[in-house]
Amino acid sequence: MRGASRSQPLRLLSTARAQYTTHRRSILCLGDSITEYASHIGTSTTLQVARHPRGSPLGSDTEQGPGWVALLARDYAWSRRADVLNRGFGGYNSRMLLEALDDALLPTDRDSVAAVTLTLGSNDSHCSSHALHVPVDEFEHNLIEILAQLQAKLPFAKRILLSPPPCDADDWRAYSLRMSDGLDDGGGLGSDGLAPYVRAARRVAGVAQEVRFIDLFLTMHSRSGWRTLLQADGLHLSAAGNAMVHALVAEALADVGRAPLDLPVHLPHWLAKTSPDAFDAEGVPLDAGNGR
């Protein structure tokens, strides 16, 4: 791994033929509610209103999980490769995330971050009269600045930028009004207003160095029946939508050399500790002949 000898957090040790680390890697997921809600593990809601700040989420029978971040956490945890950190904030736009992009969002052990995903745009694209609206030119500038700061602050992290997913404005408005007892009209979100922000994200990924781009907007639109299959409420992902995003992010992580098996295992397997002459750090018999 690049820079492995630079500091203790990235120092690799070895037992027999396999490498391990005493400092666990992490995968950092940044963004808005498309990321935050991706830690769902089953049936849940996507909307809470201000008059219930400490209460239980409003009820919903929509199946949303397991979310794509939860699925990534499973991928990296079962093999003890990395912790997946969810730093998604529902309602945040690119301006808010950029302002918080330091100690408030980033882990203390920055050298341990192997990859970072970024998903923004759904809130920026609110209608111009809404408090969350960010003009598309500023949104594009903010993405450029966020990605540049991530490159500087997380020196070993591969960066993956996801476009916002499509939005069915009518479904989202109906859901928002129903779940908030008429207090929230959905903020004027819609696919027409979202498209310029998707194009801006695509442009940023095209000019930024070493940034992998996932076009959720185009990919979801290409699926027949995406509104009912891939969305839970007109905006946020259903269980099938989360499964699709997980597959796309997992593929991107593999393409940039950050799949689970690309990373060193965290501490040796118990077999390597009890029988170091017979098993490597991952518990594979030394006579297995697999060339590891």
Image (cartoon, rainbow, N blue to C red):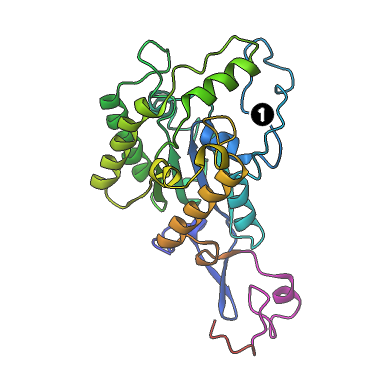
Can residue 68 be seen by looking at this rendering? no
- Name the spot of residue 158 as percent of width and height, x first: 40, 52
183 relative to 119 in the view: left or right: right
- Name the spot of residue 242 as percent of width and height, x first: 57, 45
Q: Residue at x 33, y 32 (%)?
A: 195
Residue 180 is one of the magenta-drawn residues: no
Q: Residue at x 31, y 34 (%)?
A: 145
91 relative to 218 in the view: left or right: right
Q: Residue at x 29, y 26 (%)?
A: 136
Classify 150 as above or below 177.
below
Classify 3 as above or below 241.
below
Which quadrant of the figure contains the N terminus?
bottom left
How many numbered discs? 1
Which quadrant of the figure contains the C terminus?
bottom right
264 relative to 214 in the view: left or right: right
Q: Residue furthest left?
A: 207
273 relative to 184 in the view: left or right: right
Determine which residue is flagged by label 1: 45
Q: Residue at x 71, y 36 (%)?
A: 43
- Name the spot of residue 236 as percent of width and height, x first: 55, 33
Mark 1 crowdedness (10 Å alpha carbons): few <14, some 14-19, many ≥20: many
Q: Tell me the element at label 1.
A: loop
Classify 275 as above or below 232.
below
- Name the spot of residue 143 as percent of width and height, x first: 33, 34
Magenta-drawn stretch, dominant element (helix, strand or loop): loop
The span shown in magenta is 266-286
What type is the residue that disc 1 sits on? Answer: Thr
Residue 282 is one of the magenta-drawn residues: yes
Can residue 195 be seen by looking at this rendering? yes
Q: Residue furthest right?
A: 274
In this view, the residue in front, 41 or 289, is: 41
Classify 255 as above or below 72.
below
